[in-house]
Amino acid sequence: MLSRRTRIVLAVLVVASLTFVILDLRGGQGPFASVRTVAANVLGGLERVAATVFSPITGAGGWWSDMRDQAAQIDTLQEENSRLQSDLQTLTGDKARADALDALLRVSSVGKYRFVPAEVIAVGPAQDFSWTITIDAGRNDGIEQDMTVINGDGLVGRVLKTTASTSTVVLIVDSSSAVGGRVATTEEIGIVAGTGRQDSLEFQLLDPMADVRKGDALVTFGSKGGRPYAPGLPIGEVVDVSGAPGQLTRVATVRPFADVSQLSVVGVVTRPPREDPRDSVLPKSSALAVTPSPAPLGAAADQATPSPSGAPEQETAATPAPTKKKKASTTETAATPVPETGN
């Protein structure tokens, strides 16, 4: 039991505490307001000092976590970037192969060549030849020695040898290569020989008086049975002619249409066309392509009628069939010379 004095002291303390609490709640200006303010300022300062001193330590965990998250994001982005670049290269390569195959199909459809498509898998000298390539098609695909090899730009070379699944091709620029060529505009023929350079061929005219000029296009004259070279294939463009007409050493420099340094998809001609396509395979967009001249009125009927000698009808669009001598107007004669035959 507490004594009476003790109870009185406790009661006084309780009453005093309630009084201070009531006064503080009513206005906040009690007798301890200044003490509380000083304590708050002191404690606030201590908190700021503690935060400054210990914030690097307490924030180290969060900083390390953020660094790991950022490193993971960087790795993910780098992997994604590598994958996208690989996909882009694949798409670019696929598009280039598709374009090369489309150009090859154009040559085949216009010239009526039957071919086996193949892809270049190696480039380098073989045996006694300096300019050769290896393609991923061989005997199992119906390819034989001395077959013509082309791409969408024209003649590439000929098959040198075959295995079951691959073939070695000698390019036309090899110094040992030689192919019969014909000038598309004048029908003059000669021998196109490789020079060992990827951008140059030499055209030796058989007729020293032949008319050949810079810008003329050459196509293959064709071999017997279409081997080793099928007829009508674009070879190249004349870029220079040395010697004057009549000189025995008259040679034309030719730039090949096919860029042998950038071969990807090629075609091996397994069956040449039944008839010489003449100049029809030359690209239509090229200024070198031969355009048939319009014939005078009535020429169409003469072209559709066989000649008295029983010769077959001329099918080449680039060389209009001879017509009988007719009286034509002055304007037509001047604009379009037509070959004439005797009545």
Image (tube, rainbow, N blue to C red):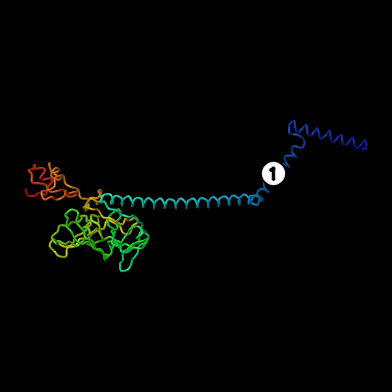
The answer to which of 2 and 191 lies nearer the viewer is 191
Q: Position of residue 224 (x, y in %)?
A: 22, 60
Badge 1 local density, few (<14 within 10 Å), some, or many (20+)?
Answer: few
Q: Position of residue 92 (x, y in %)?
A: 39, 51
Residue 262 in view (yes/no): no
Query: Residue at the spot x=65%, y=52% of the render?
Result: 57
Element type at mark 1? helix
Q: How many marks?
A: 1
The answer to which of 205 and 126 lies nearer the viewer is 126
Query: Residue at the spot x=14%, y=51% of the render?
Result: 311
Residue 102, placed above or below residue 16: below
What residue is pinned by disc 1?
44
Q: Position of residue 86 (x, y in %)?
A: 44, 53
The answer to which of 283 and 247 lies nearer the viewer is 283
Q: Residue furthest front?
A: 310
Q: Position of residue 247 (x, y in %)?
A: 14, 64
Residue 167 in view (yes/no): yes
Query: Residue at the spot x=26%, y=66% of the render?
Result: 176
Q: Quadrant of the N terminus?
A: top right
Disc 1 marks a residue whose amino acid type is Gly
Quarter holding residue 217: bottom left
Is 295 left, or right, of 235 in this rendering? left
Q: Residue furthest top?
A: 26
Query: Residue at the spot x=14%, y=59% of the render?
Result: 210
